[in-house]
Image (cartoon, rainbow, N blue to C red):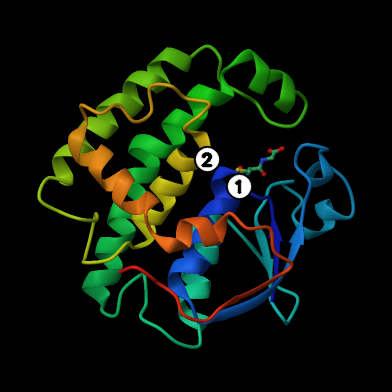
Amino acid sequence: MKLYDGGVSPNPFTVRLFIAERGGLSLEVEAVDLLNLANRSEPYLSVNPRGEVPALRLDDGTVLTEITAICEYLDEVAATGPSLVGQTAEQRAATRMWTRRVDLEAAQRFIDWWRGSEDADAFYRGHRVTQSAGREANRRIAEQGFGRLDQDLAGRSFFFGERPGLADILLFAFMFTMKDAIPWLNPPDRTNVAGWFTRMSERPSVSAAQQPVRLIHASAGGSGA
Ligand SMILES: N[C@@H](CCC(=O)N[C@@H](CS)C(=O)NCC(=O)O)C(=O)O
């Protein structure tokens, strides 16, 4: 398997963090240089014609994109360690419910807020349509989403279960990589989200996932559970 990686940016970091938490995975990694727009030209467009990272090329040549699909695939093929998606139909459904909630209610909204900035609009011009007109509405929707998630996290360590799952990993990866660019992302008065963010930050997987690598061999997984 080969992972086409985009470094410490929201979608690629989600997959890196998932791999570090999951364990039991070995894969080759190729860095795609987003800042120099390597994702928008060949040879990368032959891997993913949408010009986005990450992508995962399987040994039979199949290419998977979309982070939730990549993470769920890796979860199933990992050689060892407990699933981060779920062992039963109920657990898998709960994981997917929470993942969709954090993505739709918060992550995509604050990403769209950021993509509506002048700098982001200039960076994406000709490649991706941005939403500067709806920027403030995106912030309000994200704030409302975070308010709900804050209530959901009351009395819980993670969104679902006793260790971080796909929903925790996705939302944390997006927040962690965007925290310097979005000043309103994690205010201390959203105490449950703030506590959860600190808990996630302290996991050894977070520092492991920040290291540039050419070959991932995540054998232990989950460390710090
Ligand atoms: N829907 C894709 C989104 C991937 C995506 O937007 N990746 C960003 C990096 S965080 C990217 O490729 N940005 C570079 C660009 O659009 O030029 C997924 O779920 O993986």
> For numbered disc 2, what is the local secondary structure?
helix
Q: Are marks 1 and 2 in contact (CB under 8 Å)?
A: yes
Can residue 101 be seen from the camera position used here? no
22 to the left or right of 102: right
Residue under the point 48% across and 23% down: 113
Q: Nearer the viewer, residue 86 or 197?
A: 197
Dot 1: within a 10 Å radius of its alpha carbon, few (fewer than 14), some, or many (20 or more) residues? many
**x%, y% of residue 105?**
33, 36
The amino acid type found where label 1 is placed reads Val
Q: Nearer the viewer, residue 15 or 131?
A: 15
> Gap in Å between the C-alphas at discs 1 and 2?
6 Å
The residue carrying mark 1 has its beta carbon less than 8 Å from ligand 1: no
Quarter the N terminus occupies: bottom right
Label whose residue precedes the other's in the sequence (1 or 2): 1
The picture quadrant where one finds residue 188 is top left
> For numbered disc 1, what is the local secondary structure?
loop
**x%, y% of residue 224?**
34, 68
Q: Nearer the viewer, residue 173 or 195?
A: 195
| Picture quadrant of ligand 1 | top right
Q: Nearer the viewer, residue 35 or 221?
A: 221
215 to the left or right of 147: right
Quarter the C terminus occupies: bottom left
Dot 2: within a 10 Å radius of its alpha carbon, few (fewer than 14), some, or many (20 or more) residues? some
The amino acid type found where label 2 is placed reads Thr
Which residue is identified by label 1? 8
Which residue is identified by label 2? 177
Can residue 58 be seen from the camera position used here? yes
Residue under the point 14% across and 39% down: 151
Residue under the point 36% across and 70% down: 85
142 to the left or right of 218: left
90 to the left or right of 113: left
Is 140 located above or below residue 207 in the figure?
above
